[in-house]
Structures are given as structure tokens and as C-alpha cells.
Amino acid sequence: MASIEYKGLNRKGEAVFRIYIEGPKLADGNRNRKRETYKVPHPNKKIKLEQFEKNAMKQAEDYARDREKEINRPGYREPTKETFAQHVERWLKVHGETLAPKTLYRYKELLDRILPYLGPLPVIEIQMEHIEDLYRALAKEPRQDRKEGTLSATTIQHHARVLNTVLEYAVKRQLIPSNPAKYAKPEPPKKKDIQFFSETHIAKLTEILEEESLLNKVLVNLALSTGARAGELAALTWDDIDEEKRTVRINKSAQYIPGQGSFVKQTKTESSKRTVTVSASVIFLLKQLKGEWEAQKEELGTKWIENSNSVFYGWNGAPVHPEYPSHWWHKFIQRAMFEVVKEDYWSARHKRFISFEICKKTGIPQVSFHGLRHSCASLLLSKGQSPVAVAKRLGHSNTNVTLAVYAHTYQKDDQANADIMEKIINTPKEEAIKQKSQA
């Protein structure tokens, strides 16, 4: 049973009480007596001291009774002053090992930007207003990729997701009754159209690729044919290529983390493991590349890296950097957007024709390397391939993802729908008019 001890008035005129509460017995059977201080401020109106103390005592009794009920409730946990920074440290310790290395690295990056704002605050004190202020502050922070401007809405959305996950863990730990991040939403990012190549673009791209190395030609052809991601292609070994069956096995991905270096891991999800059939022309290119690989290995001798079996390799057989496809492609597509040609013009000053170089657009759009994956899916769907077949080729877990990402490919179908409905609606009218005119 809770008990109360009146300690008198303090300098502020508050009535101070010492409250003793009996909590659930400890594991060893001993008493679990808790002590708290409770203060009742003096009302700003004329009231006799005796009446004020009587009212204050009543408030203290009510508080002690309610507090004792709360403490003895099953599952009750004492409030803690653990800060958000301490909670994040705990979350990383418990959940860090379950995350993919690159995901963990990214989460730490995002949390490092959140901690200066929320780190010192006790988790129990974090309110929706604090999170709203955080999102406004992040929107003013400069980009860290050396580009001009501030953080994009998409990047802030990434911060919101990891913050929501970390605070959801605080709810599970019973540090807070509910997750304030659920109610504070950042500005949603604007939906961007997927960039991909049309058939015309690919025809021109193939023509320009003739000037590139065999390795890069194989890289682009495989990306377009299989829809594989850059990391999946960088991790391919010759064991993954079956020339007779004309298949490419995709079951791993190469990644790079600053400070940790390059490594190969399993694919993003279990559904990402797949075997993809490719055309005879792609297999022919792979055979040519294997021939170059073997010739270079023989020429280098002991300088060749032993046990190297990478399809995409460096001068000594080492696997290419996981980010090589994207880095090389960025430079290539910049060059491919313009075609340098020579033209002559008559110079009155020199009294002769002078040759100079000019740039003419090739008509190739600026699409990222990942856009080759989008091109593969978009073109297959537009040619009538089923979403199930395309989802399997891309390694999507279900067709809903495929349909959501590549909805633009169904615009032609939608026009066909309109034509069908127009025929259904208008044909009876046309027949009625025709019959009327004949009569």
C-alpha cells in the first residue's frame, strides 16, 4: 500500500511530498519499495495555507494510488533516461550483424547525420515536433557527392525510414509507448520517369560500341540481355557461363564499401538467384572474351593472379572494381551523346581550307548503367512477354514489383483498350444509321 509523507513547503511555495510505493516483489522475494518526490504548485489565487495543504495532500494521494497501480501492472517497465545515441548504439549492436554489409554502411551514414539533432535527447522525450524539425534541417544540408544543392527529398526519405526502424525498436524495448516517427512524414519525393533505351537507341548504341574494347561490349550486351545489375555482372565467373545450354547463372554480387574494400556476397534476395538464357550472339562474344582471357593469362605467366576466374577482369586477371560498370558507362555515354566529325571551311585569312572538329548529337539519351536493366524489362514487356517471365529474368520476388516499376510499357495496351471500347460503343450506332438510310 502506498504511503505519503508531507515534507512542507519549499522556497517556491510548492507542497513537497515523499511518496513510498510498493512494487512487485523482487526475484529473491524481498520487498520492492520505490521512493518518489511529488510537488504540488501553489495556485495563483488567495487561499488559506491549511486549505492549500489539504488539497495538495489529496492530489498526492491520488497520484500515489495511480502510480502504484501503474507499477504493479503486468509488463510494466521503469522509464529510462537512455539517450537516442545510446539506443542507436544498442540497435546497431543487436541488428547490425543481420544486415548486409552495404546496407549497414548506408544506415550508419544516415544515422551519423541524424545523431547531431536527436542524439543527446532521451528517447522518452522525443516528440513528433523534434522529428519534423529534423526533416526541415536535413532539407537545408548540402549534398556530399560534390554536386551543388541540398539533400534531395529521396535522401530525406531514406533518413525517415531508418529513423522509423530504430524508434520501432525502442517501442519493442518498451522505452516509449508509441513511435513518433510514424506521425511525422517528410515531403514525399517526386516520382521520376524510368530512363531506358528504345529499339532505335539500342541500334545506334550497338554501332557506337564497335569502337569499344571486347570486354566492354560483352558487359553492355549481357546487361541488356539478362537485365542483371552492375554488381551481379562484376561478380560473374566463367563457371557461371554454360556455352552449350546458352545460360548465365546469377547467384552473387560484387560490392564496395569505403574503408572496407571490395567483396563478393550472395545476391540481394533468394529470388535474385536465377539462371538466364541468352542468345547465340552473346555466347559468341563471351567465347571471344574467354579467348582473350586465356591469351592474356598465358602471356603474363606468374604475374597473373592465381585462381582468378572472373569474366570481367583487369590487366592481371583480378576482378574489375564493383563500381567499374557504372564508372566506365558514365564516361562512355557522355562520349556517345556526341559524335565528333571533321569539317572543312574556307579561311579568307589563310586563303585555304582549314579542317576543324565539331560535335553533332548522336541521338543517344543519357541513361545510367542501371537503365540497361530497365531497357531489358521495358522492351520485353512491350513485345508481349508475360510479367511473370520478365520478373523471373530480373530476379524480382513477385510480379507486383515488375508491374509497378514498368507500368509505362502498358500505354500501348491502354490505347488498344480505348479502341476496343470505342468499337463496342459506336458500332451499334453506325449499324442503326446504316439500316435507317437503307430503309
Image (tube, rainbow, N blue to C red):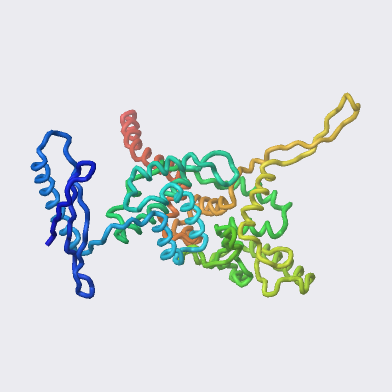
Q: Nearer the viewer, residue 370 or 226?
A: 370
Decide if residue 124 is on the left or right side of residue 204: left
Looking at the rendered image, the quarter that the N terminus falls into is: bottom left
Q: Residue at image x 76%, y 68%? A: 296
Place residue 76 in its image quadrant: bottom left
Q: Residue furthest top?
A: 348
Q: Residue at image x 74%, y 52%? A: 211
Please provide percent x and percent y for residue 199: 59, 48
Q: Is residue 158 visible?
A: no
Q: Residue at image x 8%, y 42%? A: 51
Decide if residue 262 is on the left or right side of residue 106: right
Looking at the rendered image, the quarter that the C terminus falls into is: top left
Q: Nearer the viewer, residue 304 or 418?
A: 304
Please provide percent x and percent y for residue 360: 71, 37
Please provide percent x and percent y for residue 126: 34, 49
Judge whether 245 appears above or below 46 on screen.
below
Q: Nearer the viewer, residue 263 or 131?
A: 131
Q: How many marks?
A: 0
Q: Residue furthest right?
A: 351
Q: Is residue 16 visible?
A: yes
Please provide percent x and percent y for residue 415: 43, 41
Q: Nearer the viewer, residue 53 or 344?
A: 53
Decide if residue 32 is on the left or right side of residue 380: left
